[in-house]
Structure formats: C-alpha cells, structure tokens
Amino acid sequence: MKILHIIAGASQGGAETFCLDAIKSLHSQSVDQYVLCRPHSHFVEALNERDIEHSSLSFNRFKKHAEKKIIAATIESYKPDVVHCWMNRASSFMPANINAATLGWFGGYYNLKNYKNCDFYMGVTKDIVRHIIDKTNKPHRSFLVHTFGTLEKDKPVKRSDFNIPDDAKVVLLLSRMHWKKGIDTLLKAALQIEDTYFLLAGDGPDLNKYRKLSQKLGLDNRVRFLGWRNDRAALLNIADVCVLPSRYEPFGTVIAEAWYAKTALVATKAAGAKQYVTHDVDGLLCEIDDSDTLALHIKSVLTDNKKKDTLIANGYKTYESLFSKDVVTAELIRAYQHIIQTRNAKQIYVNPNEYVTPNSVKNSLNQAVSVLDKENVDLESVCKVANSYLSMCEDKSLHSDAAYIQASGLYNFLKTTLFRPRVEILSEAEINTILSSEKCIRSCSLYEQFTKQYIKK
C-alpha cells in the first residue's frame, strides 16, 4: 500500500508527536509512505534518517489555493492508495475530486467543516468517533485507532541533572504550557506537597505566566521548567508520579506513555482520562480544577508503595491491551486496508440514456464482488428509488452518473452526494441512522416510501 501523509501542525504538541511516531512505526512495517509537512527541523531530520520521501509546504491560509494545486500534483505523481490528513488544517488543504481515498484524522472534537473533502474518518477515542458519527452519519466510514504509548529509548537522565537530590520524590508533567492543560491547578497542588520536586516539561503561550505564578507561590526552589523535551521516556523513568491536570484533553497520549513507562498516573477527569483511566485501578482521578484532591492523590502515591505498585501493574496491562505500538500500528494498517478495499469495490454503471430496469441492475450485480448478498436486494425497489430521484433531478447533465450501484457487500439504500444522485447499497444496520436524519428526509422525500416498501424484509 502507498500512503501520503499531509501534516500541517505546529512544531510541538502531543498530536504532532504522535503523527511522527506513527509514520516511523509504519516505516518499520515497510509501508510505502510520502509526507507533505511543514519544514520543522526535528520532523525533517526523522524522515531523512529513515529515507522517507517528503516535501515541505507552508500551509499558510493565504497560500491555500496554490498549495492545494501542489498537493493535487503530488497525488497525481505519487498515486497513493490513501491520503491521510492529520488534523484540521491539513484536511482543510485537501483538494476536491482527487483520485485517492482521503482519510481525516481527529485528535479532538474538531469541526467537520474542514473535512468536507475526506471520504473516511479516524478518531483516537471512542467518544471522538461518536462525535464523528453524530456529525456525518457515516459509521461505516469511521474508525477508532488509539494513539500508542510505546516510547523509544532515550539517553538516560539523572535527577542531579535538574539539581534535584537523588533521594527526593519527583512529580512529572509532560504538557504544552496552555490554560487548557491546567498547569495552575498543579502548581496550587504543589503548595500542599512537601519535600517533592516538580518537573514541568513543555513549551507554549502561557509558559511565562506559569513561571511568574510559581514565583508568586514561592515554589521556585522545587519547580523546574524544562521547556519542550523529546526524551519523554528518560524523564518518566526518574519520576515517581506522572500528572495530567488538564481542563480539556480529548485523550492525552501521556496517559498511555506513563502506563508504558511504569510510572504511576494521576489525572483530572478530562474527556480522555475519564474514558480510559479506571480510578484506583490503573490511575487516580480527580475533578477538573480541584487542586486539593489532586494534591491528596499525588501524596497517596508518594507515601503508599503498595498502591503505587498496583496502579503501575494495572496501567501496564491496559497499555498492552490497547495502546502498545504493535497493537495500534496493526489497527492503523487494518484501517488503511479496509479503506483500500472499499474504494476498490467494483462500481457498476448503468446506461445513463435509459431508465434503470431490474434486468439492467441484475446483469450488473452479477458482475459485482462475490460478497454481495443478492438475496437481500429488492431489485425492483432499488430501481424505483433510482428512477424517482432521477425524475427529481433538475440538472439533466448529472444523469451521466446518476444510477450507479456500489456493490461492496452492503445493501439497500438510496443516498445522494453534492455532485450527483447515486444509489449505494448499504448494510441494513446503517439504514435507520441515515434515514432518521433530517437532511436525508429533506433531500430525497422518500422516507416513508422507503421504510414501508423498499426494504426487503
């Protein structure tokens, strides 16, 4: 398979880090890849080290028209099976009508307007996938693939490197310095935890604000601001506790990384942690902005070795089952394979100069992929639906593709697109969701007819 990655993110950040980690892991599985990205030095160096082909774009919104043309030309020359758009900006630069399946990646609850040229969607948590399905009504084109917590080995660091005594307790934060990340909550909790040092690894717009807050609270002697660090494994290995005090965190790959590194985890009940961390089993949870309980949870781990060991052991089990590099990379490759198979499913065209007839559809269906369950297709009703929509279509020029049937092992439903009416055969499990949408009812006005007559019971 050939995968074109489009990545328009910042130089630093959890989502951006996972993009690169995923590409490196796919490379280890000999997946053919090409990357279009911003020219961030560490990103380009990693691609060069692995001889992964790449080109740089600015992804500046004022250059969007010109850079869309470059992306289209790259697709034409590279001929990928799947174009993987990582996050909002990359998806918004995706040109329309390209000859490849397009996958939009969601690391959070993003606005779907930027994904209008994507055929498939991928979310990193169960709830993000729910969000995607709620907005698109396309459960059959939405995938759950977690981020992985497996970290590459780093050059070891020592506590003395940060002017911390070797026998001191250490709490680690790996995060952007942003209001959403709840750094102020952690600093307020630190006031209540004596004889403990805090390593804050990250950069961002609020870094100076948090430096000043640390000074104001009198924590300068115990708090170390490290800036952005890529040696996450090394830092986790010298920490007693990894803390994630976020106000907003769709997942937080740090959760999986702490589990992998066998570092006890304490987090607030932001969306990601609330879905995946089981309180008092593989981590400790507190309410958002609750610095008092956050402090109590951190102290309980630092003073109770039995609890700490239990959290670490159970966290590693959760990592192995859901968030290991091998598990996640296999899920990602399976998603690519499914997308390629769906796109390559035989598309059957009916003579546009004639109304669709049962015989013409039947003859075409006989040439379709073998997995199609023909017994579940009411040919006459499918034709009625197609012809009803044809008669409603004012622009007769659209009739050239008006009545094709996508036969990919799915069955029974009329659907439309922006450019042409078409008949898609979908699974029966998907019909109720799609039919219940107001957009569908307004667009085809066939809801009652379809539910009463056109589904073969």
Image: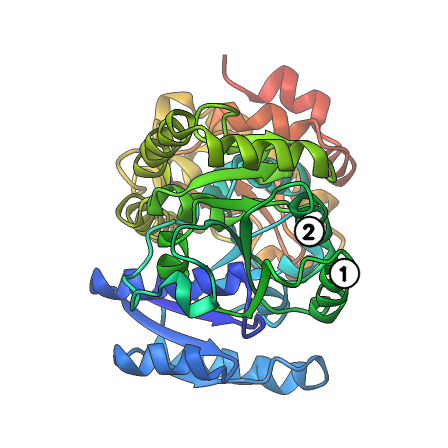
Q: Residue at x 33, y 51 (%)?
A: 150
**Category of crowding for the residue at label 2, using alpha-carbon neighbours closer than 10 angstroms: few (below 14), some (14–19), many (at least 20):** some
The Cα–Cα distance between marks 2 and 1, rounded to whole angstroms, is 8 Å
Name the foreground residue: 177 vs 368. 177
Q: Is residue 78 visible?
A: yes
Q: Is residue 111 visible?
A: no
Contact between labelled residues 1 and 2, with CB atoms less than 8 Å apart: yes
Above or below, 70 against 33 in this view is: below
Could you tell me residue 35's position as x and y percent? 41, 75
Residue placed under numbered mark 2 in the picture: 187
Q: Earlier in the sequence, mark 2 or mark 1?
A: 2
Residue 152 appears left or right of 440 = left
**Category of crowding for the residue at label 1, using alpha-carbon neighbours closer than 10 angstroms: few (below 14), some (14–19), many (at least 20):** some
Residue 343 appears left or right of 57 = left
Above or below, 129 against 17 in this view is: above
Q: Which residue type does callout 2 highlight?
A: Leu
Q: How is the image coloured?
A: rainbow
Could you tell me residue 5's position as x and y percent? 43, 69
Q: Residue at x 70, y 60 (%)?
A: 178
Q: Which residue type does callout 1 highlight?
A: Leu
Mark number displayed over residue 213: 1
Disc 1 secondary structure class: helix
Could you tell me residue 92's position as x and y percent? 64, 67
Q: Residue at x 72, y 21 (%)?
A: 448
Residue 134 appears left or right of 315 = right
